[in-house]
Structures are given as structure tokens and as C-alpha cells.
Image (tube, coloured by chain):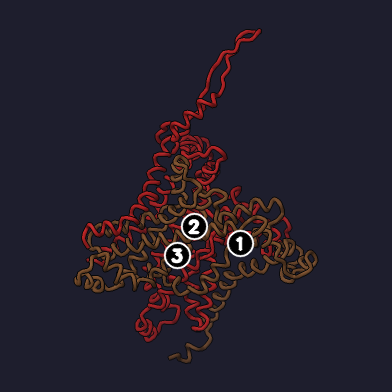
Chain colours: A red, B brown
Amino acid sequence: MKHRTFFWFILPTLSAMILFIALPIVSVFIQSLFVQHEQVLVVSESCGPFGCVEETQVDTEATAKLREEQPLGQFNGLATYFDRSHLASAEIAEVWHTSTGLSSFIDGIMDLKFYKALVFTLTYTFVVTPLVLIFGLAVAVGVNNLPKAFRGVAIFISLLPFLVATIVGSMILSWMVDGEGIIGATLQNIFNDPSLSIKASTPLMWIMLMVYGVWHTLPFAFITFYAGLQTVPQDTLEAARVDGANKWQTMISVVVPHLMPLVSFVTLMLLMDNFRVFEPLVSFQAEAHAQSLSTFIVSDLREAGNPLYASASATSMLTILGVVILLTPVLIRTWRDFNAKVH
Amino acid sequence: MATKAESRLTTLRAVSYALVITWLIIAAFPFLWTVWGSFKVQGDFFSKADWTNAIYGILTTRETGGAFTLKGYYGAWIQEEFWRNVFNTMVIVFFTVCISLTFGTLGGYALARSGFRYAFWVLMAALAFRAMPHITLVSGYMLPFFEWNIWGLKATTVIVLVAINQPFTLWMLHSFFLNIPKDMDESAMVDGCTRFQAFWNVIVPVMWPGVITTGLFSFLLAYNDYAVTSMLLSKPNETMVPAVASFLGSVQVQGNIMFAVAAVVSATAPLFVLILFFQRQIVSGLTAGAVKG
């Protein structure tokens, strides 16, 4: 294909991606370097019968005008990145000096908003991803063992949690685990504790969100592994059987190695999607117990009347950095595999 | 041919059956429960005293005279004007899918037929874009969109969803076009067609299976999106999913949580039908990227 033709064919999609994905990232970066103008203060002297008093007032008109003229605000450099609600370098240094041991250091860090969100996001990602991989594979093997007639139905049911909107799926679950919902009430009966409430306890809320994460993404791993199982070479299986391997040994030394490329693909996808966890926290109304990096950004943007663009943008840049760090090992592996295949 | 050992119910097999059945119950039960419960009153749906109330609808019978009630649906669709959100969803999803597929087929075709190095880099860039959390992109849109006065419009959201959709669409259609033999369009070009004529007359007629599969995923993305639609649409332009989420806050205060339940079921029902009819395409689409490597 000629360069010219290629250019015209690719133009619509490329311009859409550049305008609405690449440029916004640049825009986020620029916004993160600025901070909103401070209010313009006017000092006026009002002289009354008892002498003159200096008064400081907010000049609302001038403030509004300034903000209108330069919506970005004033240049702030990287200061937003290191302020109290982000990397909090000063606070960390202080915690480091005052803390008496590891646990008090961790407590000190968990008081900082950004680190709290980061810890939840990472915990969520690294708990949900392996669980989904293991259970997804188990269910895929199980469905593969089913008689053919039932497989279609099993796949249909399995697709539901994955394809229904995250917000809707997590809302359905949040009603069920509500203190008055079926699961919540049953748990209260089992543990004989009428005050037991998932929505009132931080550890339970974390567990619930992760259970939801597994429920929601397991079908993706399942479907991919199930498709992979259809392509396991029959003669290798036969050979393993002839050599006297039992089912379990065949599984570990024939099936799993065959699925390895799929495992790295699924891992890549899961890491990407789990790191941006957002909707379940909205549906479970979990903000009191758990914040993720995404909800942190949204709460800055939703700040009534006065969105904190600089703060949201700084968090966004840090999130993107996180994604890059997270994906680098997987990408390097893929790159090596790719080169190994070529040579 | 099944040997005797294979057809025997071994422990391993029993465990695997049990596992699958457990998973299927966990997967299906919440939906069945909510669909059934959406025809009850709140006292039955959240029946702390006795969970069988939710099945038989004791309180529903007492309050409304029948074991099933459409009160929740009436409240959501008529009183809270959920039909407006349904209409908005239809408009936004329709345009998003059409535009995504048009851009995606052109781009995917070009990438599949170009042997140059930069085609590879476009695909890599698309992969990197796919990894960007949507919410970080949204925080980049807000300020410029407010400045240009295009925040809140349906058209803005459509364009944003199209763009966010492109990386995935491009990858899917690229791998699909790779499977269509090169000879087809090249022989047309030997016969004197231009590249675009060859694409239009030879490739377009045979590309529909791939386009339908990709379209399903564009549909799902636009239909299910919350991060973009909740931040970029004004109240009257809201689609179903953000509307359901905002129901949650407002109706809980008024004690009308059944409105939200009915809205959730209404928003989910079309997906049931979609999966029922297109299960094969969805499965093949989910695995297309993976199995081919």
C-alpha cells in the first residue's frame, strides 16, 4: 500500500486518537503544572470616628476576571505533585522522623490521602488478578469437562457478570449484601450479630470490593482459557496418557504450558483494568472506607463549584505513571517472546 | 472414543462439576434475584425478617393486592422520566457504534495491508492508548470543554467515546482483515480498481462477520460506560448508567429504592437479549486477540 493511500485510510482513526487520547494527556500534564489563582485581596483603610482600621477584602470581581483571563491559573511547577494530598514529601519526612516503628510509620502514611488510595488500588489489583487467573482456569477446565449440550448454557450464564455494566453489577451486589438484603441478613443470622454490616467496616468493605472484582472479571479469564483449551494438541495429551500421567499431571505439564501465552495476555488485560478500578466504589458507596486513584481524581473534579483541576491532573499523571510501571514487565516479556519468535 | 475409565465419575470429575455449578449459581443468582425482586415492594426486596417474603411477595400482596407490582417501573420510567435516559442512550450508542466502525474499518484495513514499519508503531501506540485509565483522560477534557462551551452535549460524548473505542476496534479489525486473503483486493487492483474501489467493492461485502463482532464490543463499551458519560454529560443528556447511579443517591433519601432496582433491571434486560443472540460472536471476539497471539 502506498504511503499516500495509507495516510488517507488511517487519518480518521488516527486523528480521533490523537485529539482525544494523546492531547488530553498533554493537557493533563500542563494542567498539573498550574494552580488556581489565589483570590485577589484588596487592602483598604476605613476611617471611622475611632480611628482608621486596615481591612483586607476579597475583590471578587478582580478574582473572577483574572480566573476568566487565565483559566489555567498560575504556574506552579511540580509543587502540586509534592503537596499534602499527593506525594506529600514533607509529611513523609516528618512521619519518618517521628515514627517509632514500622507500624507507626505505616499508620502515618495511611493517613495521607494519596497513599491510602494507592494502597487500595495496588491491593485490589494484586489480589483480584491472581484469583481471577486461578479460578478462571479452574472453571474453564470444569466447563470443558461438561457434556457438550450444557456448555452453551454455562457460557451464557458466565458472560452475564462480565458484560453487564460495572456500575449496575456492583449495585445489584451492594443491595444483596446490604444489612437488609438477602446475603447481608443471612450473614447476620449465621454470625448471630445483628449489627454486622459490610458497609460499616473497612476490612469487610475491602473484601467485598475484591469479591466483586473477581465475580466481574472471572468470565473474561474463563472464556479466554476455555478457547485455549479447545486448541490443546490431542496427540500430546494422548502421549502423556500413554506415558502413564494421571489427569492432574497432564494438566500441570501439558495443558498449563500450552495456555501460558494466554495467561500473559489475560494478566496484561487484568492489570490494566483492575488498576483503574472505579465504578464498584461508587456503587458500594465506599468512599468512607476505600478510595482508589480513580475515585480520588473524580472527587477532585466534582469539588462543588470549584473543580480542582491541578490536583486531579497531578493524580492522573501519577496514575499513568503507575500504569506504565505496572505494564513494563509484561511488555518486556512480550517483546522478548516476539523477538524470540522472529529469530 | 470414551474409554471406561473416562466415562466413570471420578473424584476429580465430581469436584470439577461441583465447581462449575457453584460458579454458575454465583454468576446467575444476583440477576435472578434482582429481576424477580423488581416486581415487589421494598419491604419484600429487603426482607430482613424472612427472606421467603421476597419470593412469595407477602408484603406486596398486602400493599398492592397482587403478588407482583409494576410500581417500581412506573416510578422509574414515568415519575423519574427514565425514558429520557433510555432515549439518550439509544442516540449516543447508535452514533458511537456507527462512527467507530467506519473509522475502525478504514484504519484496520490500512494497517492490515501496509507492510511498512510505521503500521506496527501505530498498533503499539493504540495498545498504549488502550491502557490509559479513562478517568485520567476525562480530567484532561473537562477544562478545555468548559472553555469551548461544548461540555454536556451528546455530540461531544459521542466523539470522546469513539476515540476511546478506537484502539480496541483497530486491533480487532486489523487482525480480522489479516485473515482476508490479500489476493482478493490485489487482483481487483490489477483489473484497474483504485485502492478505495477495491476496498469498497471487494472487501466491504465480505467483512461483515468481523464488523458485527467488533460492533458488539463498541456497543457494550458505549452502553456500559460510566466514567465518561457521568462526567461529560449534562443532566438532561444523561444516559442510563449514570442515571441509575444518580438514582441511587436521590431515591434512597425518598425511600424509593425500588425505582433504582427497576431502572437497573430495565438497563440490563437489553444485554440479556444481546448475549442470547450473539453469544458466539461475543466469545469469538473476546478470544480473537488472545488465541491468535
Which x, y percent locates residue A280? Answer: 56, 56
Mark 2 surroundings within 10 Å by alpha-carbon count, few (fewer than 14), some (14 through 19), many (20 or more): many
Name which residue type carries label 1. Val
Describe the element under mark 3 as helix, strand or loop.
Answer: helix
Which x, y percent locates residue A44? Answer: 55, 15
Ranked by sequence position, the earlier of labels 3 and 1 is 3
> On the image, numbered disc 1 is attached to which residue?
B264
Q: Pointer 2 and pointer 1: residues touching (CB < 8 Å)? A: no
Chain under callout 1: B
Residue name at image x 45 percent, y 39 percent: B147
Describe the element under mark 1 as helix, strand or loop.
Answer: helix
Which x, y percent locates residue B88? Answer: 54, 57
Which x, y percent locates residue A201? Answer: 64, 52
Describe the element under mark 2 as helix, strand or loop.
Answer: helix
Name which residue type carries label 3. Phe
A213 or B292, nearer to the observer: B292
Quadrant where the C terminus of chain B sits is: bottom left
Q: Is residue A304 above or below residue B234?
A: above
Marks 3 and 1 on same chain: yes
Name which residue type carries label 2. Ile
Disc 3 versus disc 2: distance between alpha carbons? 15 Å
> On the image, numbered disc 3 is attached to which residue?
B217
Q: Pointer 3 and pointer 1: residues touching (CB < 8 Å)? A: no
Q: Is residue A46 visible?
A: yes
- In the visual, does B84 lie left or right of A265? right
- In the visual, does A253 lie left or right of A52? left
> On the image, numbered disc 2 is attached to which residue?
B92
